[in-house]
Image: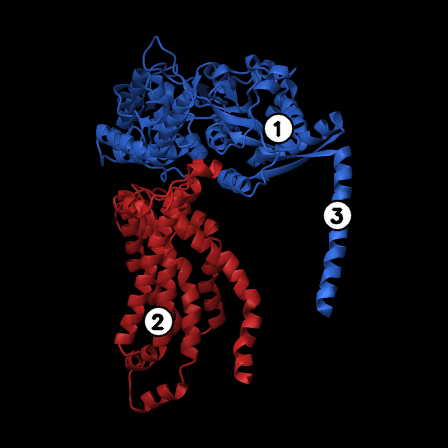
Amino acid sequence: MTGKKHFFAPFFFLTPALSAIFVFFFIPVIAAFFISFTDLDIYALGNPATIRFVGFGNYTRLLTDPLFWQALWNTLYFVLVAGPLSIAVSLLAAVLVNSRLTRWKALFKLSFFLPVVTTLVAVAIVWRFIYHPRFGIINYLLSLAGLHPIDWLGDPFWAMPALILMAVWKNFGYNMIIFIAGLQSIPEHLYEAAVVEGATNWQKFWHITLPMLAPTILFVTVITVIGFFQLFAEPYVMTQGGPLNKTLSIVLYMYREGFRWWNMGYASAIAFVLFFIIFVATLIQIKLQKAKGM
Amino acid sequence: MKYLRKITIILLISGIVSHVFVACQQKTASRQQVVRFWAMGAEGEAVQKLKPIFERQHPSIKLDIQTIPWTAAQEKLISAYASRNLPDVFQLGNTWIPQFAALNTLEALNTRIDTSRSISSAAYFRGIWQTNIIDSLVYGIPWYIDTRVLFYRTDLLKQAGFTRPPRTWQALYTMAKAIKKQSRSGQYALYLPTNEWAPFVIFGLQNGASLLKENSTRGNFESPAFLRAFEFLIRFYHEDLAPLGFTQITNVYQAFARGTFVFYISGPWNLPQFKRWMSDSLRDRWMTAPLPAPHADTIGCSLAGGSSLVLNRHSPRKQAAWTFIEFLSLAQTQVKFYELMNDLPARKAAWKDPHLKEDPYLRAFYQQLHHVKPLPKIPEWEHIAFAKIRQYVEYAARNKMSSRQALRALDRDTDKILEKRRWLLKRQHANSGEKP
C-alpha cells in the first residue's frame, strides 16, 4: 500500500513541469515529425487543402540536394575541428587558472568567461574588424611577419577556420568553469601521494588529473558536440553562409528553408536528419568512453 | 464534493466578471475604434509623429502603431497570420504582396479605390502601382518607393577623363576600365556586392529578358537576353573592376567617401547616409544618375521596389483602416513623410513640393521612376532571388562556373522551387475544366 503511494507521489509533483514539457516540447516535435512527410509551405498555410502527403519525398530530396551535403560537410568540419580544440583550450585554461601558482584567479575566470555571456551580435562586429582584409589586426600582424594579407571571411578556404577560431574563443569559458569544478573535486591527497613518490607535474596531470576528470570530460564532450552540431549564429551574423556556401551549416540551411522560404515540410525533414546524426554521434561518444573503461 | 462546489462557484464568478469586462470594452469600442497598424523599422517611428494629426482629423478612430524590425518582419507577419493576430492595416514590401495574397489574407481594394475621393491609379507612378496588382485585383496602395539608380563620384570620374555619367552599358564598361587603369590598388570602379541579386535582375530586364516562362512556372534565366546581361556584369569581377564578395567593404559610406569605388547601383534608403558622409570638401563630389541602358536608343529601366499599405481581409474595422490608408496617401502627408524619413513619395503630386523638386540628388530618381519594371508576382520569387540568383552570381563571379553553367543550374533550381506552383495551376485548370 505504502509502496504504491510512493510510486505516484513524485508524479503528482512532477505534473506541472511534465505538462509544460509535453505541451511545449513533445507536441511540437511530434507535429514536426508528421510535417516532415508533407510539403507544408506558404500555399498550404494559406489554404490547407493544398497540402500534399509526400511520404519520404523530403528525405530522398535531401539525399540529392547538393546544398544539404555541403551543409553537412561544413558542420562536420566545424564539429571535428572546433570540438576537440575547444575542449583542449578550456581544459588548459582550467588547469592554469586552478593552479596554485596562479594569482588573481577570479580575474582570469571572469575575463575568460566574459565572451560566453556577451551577445554574439556584438562579438561579431568586433571580430569582423579583427578579420577585415585591409584594416584588421590579424592581417596587420601577418604583414609584420612579411605574409600576404588574407580575406578571412571572404575567402572560401579561410572562412570556416575564421569562424572556428571565433567560436572557440567565444565558448571555451563555459567548459572551463565546468572543468574547474571537476578539478576542485579531485582529492588533494592523491597529488600529495604522487609527490611523495616523486612524480613530475606532467605525470600528475596524466595519471591523476585526466582519469579523475573522465566523467567531466565525457559530459563536456557530449554537450559541446551537441551544441556545435547546431552551429547557427556565427555564420548567420558573420558570413550569411558564404562565401560559396562554405560556412552554410545544417541549422542555418534549415532556418532558411523553414522561416525564410516557408518550406516547413522540407525544414522539418532536415531537423530530423540532424537529430538522428546528433543521436548517433552521442551514442558513439558514450560507447567509446565505456570501451576505455571509464 | 466540497471542492467541486467551490470550483464551480469560482468559475461562475469569473465568468460573470469577464462578461462584464467584455461588455465594457465593446461599449467603448462603439464610441471609438482602435485601428492597429504595423510598420517596419524607422517608418513605424515616423508614423507615430503623424498620429496626432490623423486622430485630430478623425476623432472616432484611435491608432495603435507597432514597429517591427525589417530583419524579422516577414517572420513576425507570417507568425501573426498563423495565430490570427494580424493588425487591421500594415506595411508590406511590394515583393511580399504575392506571398500574403497566397495566404489569402489581403483585402482586394478595387471597389474602395473606385469610390475613393483621394486614391486613384492615375495619381501614382504606373510601374509602382502595377506591383500591387495580381490577376487584376489591387491588393495594396503604394506608400513609398525604393528604386535603384547609379550613385557615382563626379571627381573620380572626371579624373578618368569623363564629365558625364554613363548612358549605356558600353560607356559604363569603358569608364570602368579607364578608372581602374589610373587607380591605386584596393580601388575599384564599381561596387557590385555578390550578395545583392537586384543589379543582375535589373540588367536582365533592361535587356528585355523575361525572368520566368510558362505562366511563371519555370525559370527562363538561360535565355540569350538574360545570359548577355549576366555575362556583362560578371565581367566586372573577372577583370577586377569590382571587388569580390562583400566583406572587403564593411562600411559602404566610408568606402564611397574614401574613393574605394566610383559607381554603386543603389536606392534612396542610402541617400541620407551618403549626404552625411560626403560632407565638407566632398560635398559636391558625388551625384546620382538614371541607370545606363543596353543600347543608346533605349532607356535603362530599374526595379519598381517600395512599400505598400495593405488591408487585412479579416479585420472587423476595414472602413476605419481604409480611412487611415487614405490619410497616409494624401499628397501633403506624403511630403511630410518625406521630410521625416526621406522616403520617396509614391504619389506623383508630392514630387511638386519644393523640398523634393530642388534636391539635385532626387532628379535621377524622378526620371528613373518613369521607367521601372515589376518583379515576377509569385510567392516563390523571394526564394529564387535571395537564395538562388545570389548563389549562382557568386559561383560565376568566383569562376566556379561559367555564366552559362550558372544560369543552367539556376533554371534547374528554379524549376524545382516552382514544382508546387505547376501542380496548383494544373489542378486549378482541371477543376475549371470540369465545371462547364
Q: Chain of mark 1?
A: B
Dot 3 falls on which chain? Answer: B
| Residue beneath the point at 76% across and 51% down | B16
Q: Position of residue B371 (x, y in %)?
A: 44, 15
Q: CA distance from mark 1 to mark 2?
A: 58 Å
In the picture provided, is A106 more to the left or to the right than B157? right
Tell me, what hue is chain A? red
Specify how the rendered protein is coloured: by chain
Q: Would residue B132 appear left or right of A80 to someone viewing this image? A: right
**Which amino acid type is shown beneath numbered disc 3?**
His
- Tag 1 near tag 2, CB within 8 Å: no
Q: Is residue B119 left or right of residue A226?
A: right
Q: Secondary structure at mark 1?
A: helix
Shown colour of chain B = blue
Left or right of A282, for residue B290: right
Where does label 1 land, which residue? B340
Residue denoted by label 3:
B19
Quadrant of the image occupied by residue B245:
top left
Q: Is residue B64 above or below residue A103?
A: above
Query: Which mark is in front, 3 or 2?
Result: 3
Crowding at mark 2 (Cα within 10 Å: few <14, some 14-19, many 20+)? some
Which residue type carries mark 1?
Leu
**Residue A127 image offset from top left, x and y in percent:** 41, 50
Residue of label 2: A218
